[in-house]
Image (tube, helix red, strand yellow):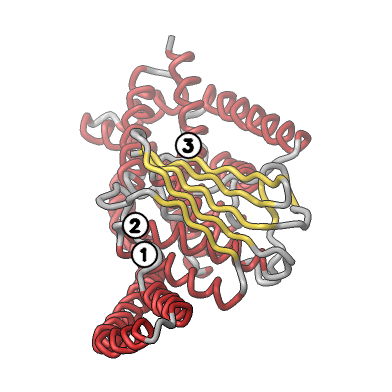
Amino acid sequence: MMEILQVLICLAETLFPFWLGNKILERRYQKTIGKVFWYAGMVVYIGSLIYQRHFYMYSRFFMLWAIIFTSILFWRYYKVSFWKSVLLLSIYYETIAIMDLLGMTLPGLVNGKEDEFLVNVHRNITYERILIYTAVRLLLFLIFSLLIYKNNDIYWGIESKIIIVLFPVFEYISMVQCEGAFYGKYGEAIQNIYLYFLAYVVSLSYLIIAFVRSNSDYLRKISEQKNQFIEKDYKRIIEQNRQREMLIHDTNKHYIVLEGFLEEQENEKALEYVKELKKDICKNARKITTGNMVLDAILNDKLELSKMAGIDFAADIESMNHSFVQDKDWCVLIANLLDNAFEAVEQEKEKVIGVHLKRKESGIIIHIENSFTGSLKMNGKQILTTKSRNELHGWGLQSVKQVVKKYAGIMNYEHKDNMFHVYIMLYK
């Protein structure tokens, strides 16, 4: 029974980092051969972990191998650098190892039977060992889960290469110092463990601060982008109001001119004059109204740009007043998707862009389409960007995907009849 429980614990310990990765990272596309090697690698690692734990509870050398091996698997599974994979997996496995070591030393120290308890749980699959394993891993799973709770739209944003290298090294040195318990130095080992946790908390706090700062920079860029659209909209409103006031001021004169035409029975001139007045009124009227200020700002800004660029811009939008989508998320979704659409139609003879927003009981459907006669570069289900600076996947599309994931939504692409379509469903 204890063997079976230990196998289940080994499975949970191995799979948890990948569950965590699914929450904060984007998967890589893998060809069939790549998937075969990845699954084979997982089987090899899990098998070796079960084999190692059959003989010993704790092994620092096996932990080093586990970090390297699983970092390669993690790196090949998610769109993240290898060194960030090493950082994440080293924090995870080294923390497990040091807490297992703590669980092995403290009970024996309390009971006054250090040698007996340590040797017993280290070399045998006992009830105490299973209890320590379970308590340590449940605690770590809870901590990591709380860190990403309601924050699954942000990413592992640590950019400091010094921290990426020094943090795992620091943890490893701390573990070496704590292993005095295996050589009868229990008091010294316990002191080292306490010092380790103090330094660990300080270092981990630095990592969290760097993570939060990275996320704050991301949100700040979104806020600046949203404010730019709002500022443009306010300026447009002021100009429209000025034009309306001028039109009202001149209305009297227009009536006098029309009265003169009609008195002289110049009906055709009167009709032409009325048509010109209607053009001026339409020109100064608000073109798109959604009930959401951010959406109105973005769509009207793009509408004006489309006129200057000779683009046929169509909008079929239901009221988005009081929608469950936050303003900053509307800004990310619509602004980035329309930026991509405008860039795509630059080289097209027939320039067409369409925006469709529909409200359903379950959520909101977003459909952006643009003319595109070229060919798409695909890597499986992923669209490869044609931008020289790779902005589509770096800032634009990646941000859109994070918002879609935030609302548990789905996003699909389609290219047919010389039109490229993006379909997004956001759920309440």
User: Contact, CB < 8 Å: mark 3 with mark 2?
Assistant: no
Identity of the amino acid at label 2? Thr
Residue at mark 3 to residue at mark 1: CA–CA distance: 39 Å
Residue behind mark 1: 296
Give the farthest residue toward the left: 110
Expressed as whole percent of the image width and height from the top left, the position of residue 404 reads 45, 47
User: Contact, CB < 8 Å: mark 1 with mark 2?
Assistant: yes
Residue under the image location 32 percent in, 51 percent down: 320
Task: Please rate how many residues cluster around mark 3, counting C-alpha atoms within 10 Å: few if below 14, some from 14 to 19, many from 20.
Answer: few
Expressed as whole percent of the image width and height from the top left, the position of residue 365 reads 45, 43
Q: Earlier in the sequence, mark 1 or mark 2?
A: 2
Identity of the amino acid at label 3? Trp
Identity of the amino acid at label 1? Asp
Quarter-wise, where is residue 350 in the image?
bottom right
Q: Earlier in the sequence, mark 3 or mark 2?
A: 3
Give whichever of 166, 314 is nearer the camera.
314
30 sits to left or right of 398: right
Secondary structure under the numbered disc 1 in the rendered image: helix
Residue behind mark 3: 19
Residue under the image location 36 percent in, 47 percent down: 148
Secondary structure under the numbered disc 3 in the rendered image: helix
Task: Please rate how many residues cluster around mark 1, counting C-alpha atoms within 10 Å: few if below 14, some from 14 to 19, many from 20.
Answer: many
State the quadrant of the C terminus: top left
Task: Judge depth for marks 3 and 1 and give the one in front.
Answer: 1
Residue under the image location 76 percent in, 34 percent down: 32
Residue behind mark 2: 290
353 sits to left or right of 10: right
Task: Please rate how many residues cluster around mark 2, counting C-alpha atoms within 10 Å: few if below 14, some from 14 to 19, many from 20.
Answer: some
Give whichever of 279, 225 is nearer the camera.
279
